[in-house]
Image (spheres, grey):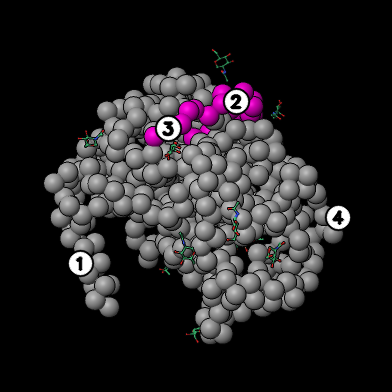
Amino acid sequence: MILTLLSMSLAIFGVSGQTNPAFAPPAVCPVCTSGNYTGQNNGSLPIQPRVPGKAYSRFIQIWLENTDFETAQASTTFSKLASEGILLTNYNGVTHPSEPNYVASIAGDFFGMSDDSFYALPPNVSTQVDLLELHNVSWATYQENMPYIGFSGDYAQKNYLDPSSKVPYTYYKRKHNPFIICDSIASVPARMNRIRNFNDFAVDVNASALPSWVYITPNLVNDAHDTNVTFVSAWLEYFLVPLLNNPNFNDNETLILLTFDENEDYKSQNTVYTLLLGGAVSDYKGTIDSTFYTHYSSLSSVQNNWGLGTLGRQDSNATVASVFQFQANMTNHTNVVSDVTPLMNLTGILPGVCASQRWIPVTAPEMSAIGAGGGPVFTSGITSNVSCENTTPINLTDMGLVNPATINPNYTMLSSNTKVNATSSSTLPSSSAIASSKSSAGHVRLCLPAVSSTIVYLLCAILLS
Ligand SMILES: *[C@@H]1O[C@H](CO)[C@@H](O)[C@H](O)[C@H]1NC(C)=O
Ligand SMILES: *[C@@H]1O[C@H](CO)[C@@H](O)[C@H](O)[C@H]1NC(C)=O
Ligand SMILES: *[C@@H]1O[C@H](CO)[C@@H](O)[C@H](O)[C@H]1NC(C)=O
Ligand SMILES: *[C@@H]1O[C@H](CO)[C@@H](O)[C@H](O)[C@H]1NC(C)=O
Ligand SMILES: *[C@@H]1O[C@H](CO)[C@@H](O)[C@H](O)[C@H]1NC(C)=O
Ligand SMILES: *[C@@H]1O[C@H](CO)[C@@H](O)[C@H](O)[C@H]1NC(C)=O
Ligand SMILES: *[C@@H]1O[C@H](CO)[C@@H](O)[C@H](O)[C@H]1NC(C)=O
Ligand SMILES: *[C@@H]1O[C@H](CO)[C@@H](O)[C@H](O)[C@H]1NC(C)=O
Ligand SMILES: *[C@@H]1O[C@H](CO)[C@@H](O)[C@H](O)[C@H]1NC(C)=O
Ligand SMILES: *[C@@H]1O[C@H](CO)[C@@H](O)[C@H](O)[C@H]1NC(C)=O
Ligand SMILES: *[C@H]1O[C@H](CO)[C@@H](O)[C@H](O)[C@H]1NC(C)=O
Ligand SMILES: CC(=O)N[C@H]1CO[C@H](CO)[C@@H](O)[C@@H]1O
């Protein structure tokens, strides 16, 4: 209790001493390395050829935090950027709070997650990374102030905005890095090397080695999480505005999605100010698109662009995964417009492997799903065809059990660019198992409640805990 109070007051002091600090650049320029970023770069990614897409050959998404649509709209920086691209006026987060939104943006679901706690999703949760790699589309995520490759916790460091402060500041948090949360990525060394920090970003851009699919998470001050729209606007002027003119970042085949994880007002629809920028939309400068989109749209649009197949989760649910309309017009994709716009501000209701009070195992993808890119459902690593509808949730909390998804798998950093776990490697999809299949079972989702494997899974959890 005392510790909690102490850390709370430290947190309040640390943050409130500078609730609204003035923006200061963490590096001399967006493509300059900086001591503020802790981990040194150990070389750029290899330059990989870009796979031509139907509407673009590079997709970059940048994630900001917790801001209502109107708040961003009032910023002159956001207005200026809007004149350079397409303003999406009905783009939505998928739930609250932050972490499930980040997870949904790569895995197509948030698995009942309704808080920002420690989660490690089991290896059989597939992600967009599986689809990209299957089609040779290179990828990386750049996580500002993540100290070094392979780091799996939160990181407090010297406060660079207030150098006189003796209190370390947590600029980087795991909850905003969905890649480290998914064991299918975090337990595979070659994939771990693609979870990079901003020193790596600087080196990769300067080496023309920025991959084709890029996911950028700014630190907790630059993304507005600990600050406000004035601060994030200054960061955008420092970071994004010059990068739009850097040909190693933005060219005539680049689409940039600038979005927020969720809005601030949970009592209203979860609409966030979102822009499409970059050379791929140069014919649409200053236009407005009011199509209903969600974070699942970034999955479906990319799948549509490169013909990637689908994860068979909400990424293939046409109601919530419209393809960017400028792109849909180019690819002849027809978006579904539902009579009633779904509310995206619901939280703590759905069962899932992350919902300890409504726990169900990782369920099978919708095997018969057809996503916006056509092609098969990714099923590698799937060992059960149990579906959500037919699984009775278990209240682990009531049973005194620890949810295995909340246990740190303790992956160990072995060397600078190698990160190898031990415990779950046997359950990882082997490369030979990388094969996709489409069920012939039609639309009926079979229900075979995996009672025995559920018990084994929980037993493991108890033994480990
Ligand atoms: C953000 O915080 C700064 C510093 O306190 C303040 O000057 C600015 O007015 C705030 N911006 C908004 C939109 O409230
Ligand atoms: C870190 O950022 C601060 C604030 O902009 C800057 O004064 C300082 O020079 C930076 N440190 C390094 C090592 O780049
Ligand atoms: C983009 O520019 C390159 C080089 O100038 C050119 O080869 C390519 O066709 C252009 N792509 C599009 C979609 O205009
Ligand atoms: C979600 O937003 C709707 C529309 O503004 C509102 O009516 C509803 O009360 C909100 N739900 C919650 C749980 O706050
Ligand atoms: C698709 O999304 C809508 C809106 O969230 C939801 O009501 C529906 O259950 C989803 N369909 C599937 C198959 O998950
Ligand atoms: C897409 O095509 C429709 C029908 O031709 C048109 O009304 C709409 O303006 C187009 N949208 C975009 C973003 O190009
Ligand atoms: C889209 O449809 C138009 C008209 O039918 C056709 O000319 C065009 O080739 C189609 N584009 C694609 C990418 O299929
Ligand atoms: C995912 O793995 C867990 C643990 O091994 C298992 O209980 C579950 O049935 C699996 N889910 C699928 C869809 O394969
Ligand atoms: C789960 O069990 C806990 C502890 O008994 C209880 O407080 C909670 O309401 C239960 N949750 C649900 C969804 O039934
Ligand atoms: C680079 O390698 C050094 C030495 O092995 C290591 O300490 C450092 O953490 C690595 N940096 C990154 C960003 O991985
Ligand atoms: C992986 O973890 C297991 C269990 O903690 C440990 O015994 C093993 O040595 C680890 N393997 C590697 C390569 O770190
Ligand atoms: C070094 C490390 O991260 N250890 C963690 C391993 O996982 C257990 C259970 O979640 C944690 O308590 C340890 O802190």
Instruction: Determine the main secondary structure of the stretch shown in magenta.
Output: loop
Q: How far is disc 2 from disc 4 in space, using C-alphas?
A: 36 Å
Q: Give, as a three-letter code, the residue at label 4.
A: Ser
Label 1 or label 3, whichever comes before in sequence order:
1
Where ligand 8 lies, by image quadrant? Answer: bottom right
Closest to the camera, between mark 3 and mark 2, is 3
Residue 376 is left or right of residue 416, and the answer is right
- SS at circle 1: helix
Q: Residue furthest right?
A: 440
Q: Quadrant of residue 444?
A: bottom right
Is residue 396 at least partly visible in the picture?
yes
Residue 234 is left or right of residue 97, and the answer is left
The reply to whether the magenta stretch includes residue 433 is no
The residue identified by callout 4 is 440
Query: Which residues fall within the magenta stretch?
Result: 40-62
The residue identified by callout 3 is 41
Q: Residue at x 22, y 42 (%)?
A: 160
Closest to the camera, between mark 1 and mark 4, is 1
Label 2 or label 4, whichever comes before in sequence order:
2
Residue 26: x %, y % from top left: 27, 36
The residue identified by callout 1 is 9
Residue 17: x %, y % from top left: 15, 55
The numbered mark at residue 420 is none
Circle 1 Cα neighbour tier, 10 Å, few/some/many (<14 / 14–19 / ≥20): few
Q: How far is disc 1 from disc 3 in space, using C-alphas?
A: 35 Å
Closest to the camera, between mark 3 and mark 4, is 3
Q: Nearer the viewer, residue 353 or 366?
A: 353
Q: Is mark 4 within 8 Å of ligand 8?
A: no
